[in-house]
Image (cartoon, helix red, strand yellow):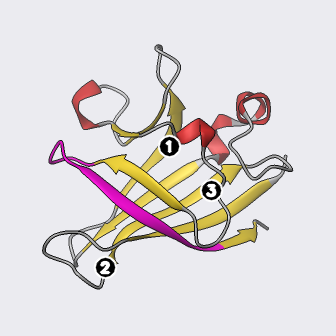
Amino acid sequence: MPLYNVRLEMAREPGFPEGNKNRGYLLVLPLGDDMKIDGAEWKKQPEACTVERFWDGERAELGYLERHKKGQWVFDYDFDDDEDEESGFRLGEHSFNKGEYVSISGHDGKMHTFTVVAVNPAG
């Protein structure tokens, strides 16, 4: 499985004109040649596709990349609680190349934009 370690950091937004490198995600994603999430590869080993949310010194949250029943990709931190999921805006259509932007709806229900700051093969 072509797994990659991906680091996302908050991009500029109101309240953070320079962005915030202390808010973001560390992801392990199955990426295809186009650097987009490869759903077929995810199905082979979903437990390997992890998420670590870091947020200004709060305790890190650990979870998994999941495919919601409606087809969208979400970050799921508790399988028994559908309210804890964070969804990405068209996450399956984004290329995870360094410098690209990704929007994720956080726990606060607001959409935040993140910059892909690092992408490296896992392992």
Give the image quarter of residue 56. bottom left
Instruction: Bin the neighbour count of mark 1 within 10 Å (Cα to Cα): few under 14, some 14-19, many 20 and up.
Output: many
Residue on which the image places disc 1: 64
> Label 2, label 3: how many angstroms apart (C-alpha)?
22 Å
Helix, strand or loop at mark 2:
loop
Q: Splitting the image into 4 quarters, where does residue 21 fall?
A: bottom left
Question: What residue is at 71 percent from the left and 31 percent from the top?
Answer: 39
Q: According to the image, label 3 marks what residue?
A: 28
Is residue 3 toward the left or the right of residue 12 in the image? Answer: right
> Residue 28, relative to residue 41: is it above or below?
below
Task: Looking at the image, tell me whether mark 2 or mark 3 is earlier in sequence order.
Answer: 2
Q: Earlier in the sequence, mark 2 or mark 1?
A: 2
Q: Dot 2 corresponds to which residue?
A: 19
Q: Quadrant of the C terminus?
A: bottom right
The percent position of residue 92, horizontal first and vertical second, equals 60, 37
Image: magenta residue range: 106-118
Q: Which of the two residues, 8 or 51, is positioned nearer the viewer here? A: 8
Badge 3 element:
strand
Residue 93 drawn at (x, y percent): 61, 39
Dot 2 alpha-carbon crowd within 10 angstroms: few under 14, some 14 to 19, many 20 or more: some
Name the disc covering residue 99, or none: none
Q: With 114 as the anchor, is 29 left or right in this view?
A: right
Above or below: residue 63 compared with residue 6? above
Q: Amino acid at mark 1?
A: Tyr
SS at mark 1 in the image: strand
As shown in the figure, which amino acid type bears the numbered disc 2? Gly
